[in-house]
Amino acid sequence: MPKRVIYQASIEYLQILDEEGNLDVPLAEGTLSDDQVRHLYQQMVIYRHFDDTAFKLQRSGRMGTFPQNKGQEAVAVASAAALTRGVDYVVPFYRDNAMLFEMGLPMHQVLLHWMGDERGNEVPKNLSLSMSNLMIGAQVLHGPGIAWAFKLRKEPRVVLTTFGDGATSEGDFHAGMNFAAVFKVPCVFTCYNNQYAISVPRSRQTASETFAQKALAYGIPTIQVDGNDIFAVYKSHKDAVERARGGGGPSFIEAVTYRLTDHTTADDARRYRPEGELEEALKREPLVRTRKYLEKKKLWDAPQQAALEERAKKLIREVVDTAINIETPQTSDLFDYVYQSLPPHLRVQRETLRTDSIGQNPSQIGLQVPKEPDGAELGRERLAHS
Amino acid sequence: MPKRVIYQASIEYLQILDEEGNLDVPLAEGTLSDDQVRHLYQQMVIYRHFDDTAFKLQRSGRMGTFPQNKGQEAVAVASAAALTRGVDYVVPFYRDNAMLFEMGLPMHQVLLHWMGDERGNEVPKNLSLSMSNLMIGAQVLHGPGIAWAFKLRKEPRVVLTTFGDGATSEGDFHAGMNFAAVFKVPCVFTCYNNQYAISVPRSRQTASETFAQKALAYGIPTIQVDGNDIFAVYKSHKDAVERARGGGGPSFIEAVTYRLTDHTTADDARRYRPEGELEEALKREPLVRTRKYLEKKKLWDAPQQAALEERAKKLIREVVDTAINIETPQTSDLFDYVYQSLPPHLRVQRETLRTDSIGQNPSQIGLQVPKEPDGAELGRERLAHS
Amino acid sequence: MPKLDLVEAINLALTQEMERDERVIVLGEDVGLNGGVFRVTAGLYKRFGDDRCIDTPLSEQGIAGVSVGLAMGGMRPVAEIQFDGFLGPAYDQLTNQAARCRSRTRGSLSCPMTVRVPVGGGIHAPELHSTSPEAHYVHTPGLKVVMPSRPYDAKGLLISAIRDPDPVIFFEPKRVYRSFKEEVPEEEYTIPFGKANVLAEGTDITVITFGASVFQCLEAIDLLPESMSVELIDLRSLSPLDEQTITESVRKTGRAVVVHEAPKLAGLASEISSIIQENCFLYLQAPVQRVTAYDVVMPYYKLELEYLPNAERISAAIRDCLAY
Amino acid sequence: MPKLDLVEAINLALTQEMERDERVIVLGEDVGLNGGVFRVTAGLYKRFGDDRCIDTPLSEQGIAGVSVGLAMGGMRPVAEIQFDGFLGPAYDQLTNQAARCRSRTRGSLSCPMTVRVPVGGGIHAPELHSTSPEAHYVHTPGLKVVMPSRPYDAKGLLISAIRDPDPVIFFEPKRVYRSFKEEVPEEEYTIPFGKANVLAEGTDITVITFGASVFQCLEAIDLLPESMSVELIDLRSLSPLDEQTITESVRKTGRAVVVHEAPKLAGLASEISSIIQENCFLYLQAPVQRVTAYDVVMPYYKLELEYLPNAERISAAIRDCLAY
Ligand SMILES: Cc1ncc(C[n+]2csc(CCOP(=O)(O)OP(=O)(O)O)c2C)c(N)n1
Ligand SMILES: Cc1ncc(C[n+]2csc(CCOP(=O)(O)OP(=O)(O)O)c2C)c(N)n1
Ligand SMILES: [Mg+2]
Ligand SMILES: [Mg+2]
């Protein structure tokens, strides 16, 4: 046939819990239990609390730039819920604080990280987690690599790699997706489409109608979900994780959400955010709708909410105290984690805290003949000038 | 609706002239005239001749590594036929010799290029052409940049950017496609899918069913065509060029073809090419079917073919002579094209052909006191040792 | 004459060049409506429109490579890479494409583009927002590299960069962005590349530096006794280097200390030290000293001031070099 | 003992390490069925299968970044980048990711990977197939960089690289690939990083080099009168550098010439020259000389032998340095 269709694709959008807290019961079948929903809701509230507190810490000068996670909590908690703890591995992006917490990272470490303290970045021994990366997109290659290691060793582990909408424009995204598909590694890619990369709106990030369709380029199964809906996020991830664990290779999930804050504490979104947009987004945000749902189902009430908020406040206060009261790092820390063992030139730099050769070897001082040039030297100079 | 299709795509395959030289007349309507077909056929034969000759030049030690273009001529000549000469601009990839010729590059320049002579790479003044790039994928970003310049200046010019199937894996491809789509620049992307990137087959290059679908990731109109069919190549490019010139932005064309040779003269495809594959491909190659078509239509006969071959032979002999007889390049050429004007350190290097400071300034020689250390120096040494 | 800080001086240069030459366009992440994360491009979007002050997708590779194409196509792109660390993805297009465009085509194509990059540490930024990769670009023939330390120089050098027929990497020491103001002429002026600036004349020792380290060196000099006469050279242009000014100074003083924020091993200080040795061998009273960051990864910011060469380390090196 | 060329020695090291340690895998463009464009991985595909000798898509960025992930995930990837110029797209993942993995996580994650790269000119290859970008990686804390010049060293250094707990860039001078054979022990052995090789002892002048330039230096020495006693040092390891061997030699000879294929400006010779000056100041009879490529883009191959330091240029520099 001279002219024929050789390729067709269609992508689904999934929402199970709507903005008013109404559940699509058939679709919700086999997803989250009431207990799980209650648990995830509480986690989200705690993380929201963390977020607000971190913001204040920065504003009061006790922390550097901080990227708030506000509004994106549902993607993190519900996707993490689809993983098997202690087995599956997460490669998160820099804004994904809620994910780090869900994977078990002590919360004060995230504060330390943004306080410019590398101790915040040490992965506790038993966690299957790489730390967030300030290079947008870089981790989208690491996730497939780690997943490939699992596959080569025939360990039934899945990797979840997360990133923002902006990250999809980087070459690392392109290569990561392609390698994952070609080598059919057990990796789930989750794109937090929060509509912005700093000030750049999604319409300037890509001319494609969805981010989900970017996966078609690699032959990767793909879906777009309501990222403020823990049921849809959970279900799509559960499916993807199962596919990966079963040898079916990678999947892509575009989670549509919204950044309810400035890009970071160094940003002012009023410069670029169209009027009314934030207000609209607030109607769709995940905490409110999850609470509505729980309340409708009589799984949650005001006293519980009050107690939760009290608990969150106390917890976060402790977290902040831990981060703030940590002892000052040692200068020697600079040297001790660059290589597994110190090469000679670093040993000298570490010992002397100098890079100038005389400072490194002060016994040279004063060994030189006095500065006044003697005759011979004068002569040489004169010759050299001529 | 909680679950709905939000995106659908379908990609067409186009073939107008089949392997036996049969034309789909309705589809061919408004494409190439008889004269054009005859012309393109002759060009292809000449380029094939060039290719064979270049191969022999390398084998006889008169040229370095050379990438043959054999089997891919139809994509070049028929896509170039869709451009307006002197207006549209081509950004070709390294194997695209036929394209360089179609755009008017003197043929001996391609030989010079592969003979390691930069004079082969000088773009003649009136040509709208960037030279081929040995960095796979790099030019896929330059094409959109040049097209953007045209758009910004409101010049109604279109850029054709070509590359291989392997190039689609590079980050530069990803960024080039994305920028082109976001800024809606008048750029046509043509992928020569010749089934291999050196030894790596397309199945290892991507897990996607087609290369054409990679354009969906960027929201770029896309098609797959029979790359050995000058009618399909012409028609798809004509449409894409029109769209671009009309302000409709970029298009993507996957031209399915086959590399009828080793990757380069440094390669041996027998190491990795499945048996029988080449033979199958030879049945589909462009010259044979175009000739069949012409002969069926009585537009071509054996005497004409003989005359053409004679002409090609003579032409290529002259081309080879020109390339081989060029004078040796000057050492100063090293310096003269790095910057528009020489910075001081390069001026010195160019004049002295030395990098060592004494060599650059030989008046220093012999100015030093004799080598035997005098007392003072010995003393210093001793002190330094202590 | 208005007093401007570094950000304002660069902004003024951009504005004037865009006004003067239609081919000049600004592109990068968040440079448009948002005016740049350091506000360097503030106002350009409003003044020149979305066609000439352009927010791009998040791809430094794309920004660099498309700029190469724009330049080949006759424009004069001024690309912003948001932070030093993010030059990484742009490196290939800059070193293998921009730098080679002219020589690859024997001068028939060229690549007149400028890449602006906030550089260096000291502002409590997160990782990869505080690096000093200039040596990689200096070691790339075909590129020019400059790093002004002050508003006046920034304006003149940026105008030179934009008008230069070859690709220029224009590093902006972000620690200096808002640190002080100085008089910057309203009218256009250019500062030629390859000309260092002697900030202080002296006879005992030469201190050679560039970028934000200039201010650490000034502080260091303040820590020294009056009797030590220090000549301070701000290179401004890193490729080409002003060998002549360096050489003349060290022939006079006989001693030199080179200071920069990048690590020591194969950093630019080694080049400058070598040049001095080659050109001033018979004049040197002590080995040329290098005061740089340690050869470690730029740490998170709690330790950045221990990592970067500071006034104490620099002054100690000057003292020790003088005492050698 | 079998006599092997550089390609065979590297192939043997790869084979033995893959045999010894299941975590070792080889990946890159055309390394599988095809055995690598230089045939360095020939036979590995057949012996270890597609799971351990892996053809990848055409993306150096991908090869580098996925290798970082593989290493984080407990494997010992040995990636091949097909030619030096193609390190460009891998640069970001190598310098900003591989090099920082350990320090970023305070040692809780690490990146034990090796990147093999054919390097340098002299084989009539097309553009971007003949570059010498080693200085960029030496100037990157967190990476180690080696460049053997001969089969024996290549085997021992590659085994060290693969077993190293940190990322190593392993440069293979392609001009030497097939140029000669020497005895290479069948059994495993390692050569520690940071140890130079004194190829010839001498008393008048020290010549310091690495990679293919070793052979141009040997040729240069042959051009000199017998009476000139030259010490020749092959660095082998570029980061860390063997400062001790360099220093001891130049303290003995009082003169030094540093030779490499990369351009001069901010090349590795400047680092070595600086080290010598700092450590041997009172012993130096002449300024340390740098014989390198010119500060121009590596030309197309008709002119490559004029660009690369050759025996004539090197011997002239040695003579002149001795006559200073
Ligand atoms: C390679 C790189 N380029 C630029 C930046 C600066 N930057 C930090 S966050 C950001 C936007 C990221 O957008 P997205 O991926 O959508 O994530 P989001 O911030 O929206 O969560 C940018 C441009 C960076 N950190 N790394
Ligand atoms: C960045 C880069 N990586 C690797 C190579 C080596 N190389 C040269 S051609 C080639 C294959 C290119 O495949 P494709 O894009 O399909 O073009 P084809 O050769 O099939 O025409 C490779 C890997 C290169 N030149 N540039
Ligand atoms: Mg975003
Ligand atoms: Mg191909």
Image: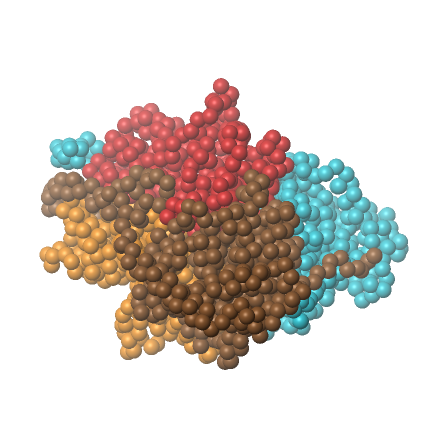
Chain colours: A cyan, B brown, C red, D orange
Q: Nearer the viewer, residue B350 or D47?
A: B350
Can residue C216 be seen by looking at this rendering?
no
Can residue A281 be seen by looking at this rendering?
yes
Q: Nearer the viewer, residue B373 or C14?
A: C14
Q: Is residue C128 above or below residue D194?
A: above
Question: How far across and down, in percent of the image, does residue C282 sit?
Answer: 20, 38
Q: Residue at x 65, y 61 (%)?
A: B29
Question: How far across and down, in percent of the image, does residue A30 sit?
Answer: 80, 67
Q: Residue at x 62, y 51 (%)?
A: B242
Q: Nearer the viewer, residue C103 or A117?
A: C103
Question: How far across and down, in percent of the image, does residue A122 sit?
Answer: 56, 54
Task: Check the picture and name the quadrant holding the N terminus of chain B.
Answer: bottom right
Residue A25 vs residue C160: left or right? Answer: right
Question: How far across and down, in percent of the image, does residue D290 sit?
Answer: 26, 48
Q: Residue at x 45, y 71 (%)?
A: B303
Q: Residue at x 83, y 53 (%)?
A: A18
Residue C145 vs residue C287: left or right? Answer: right
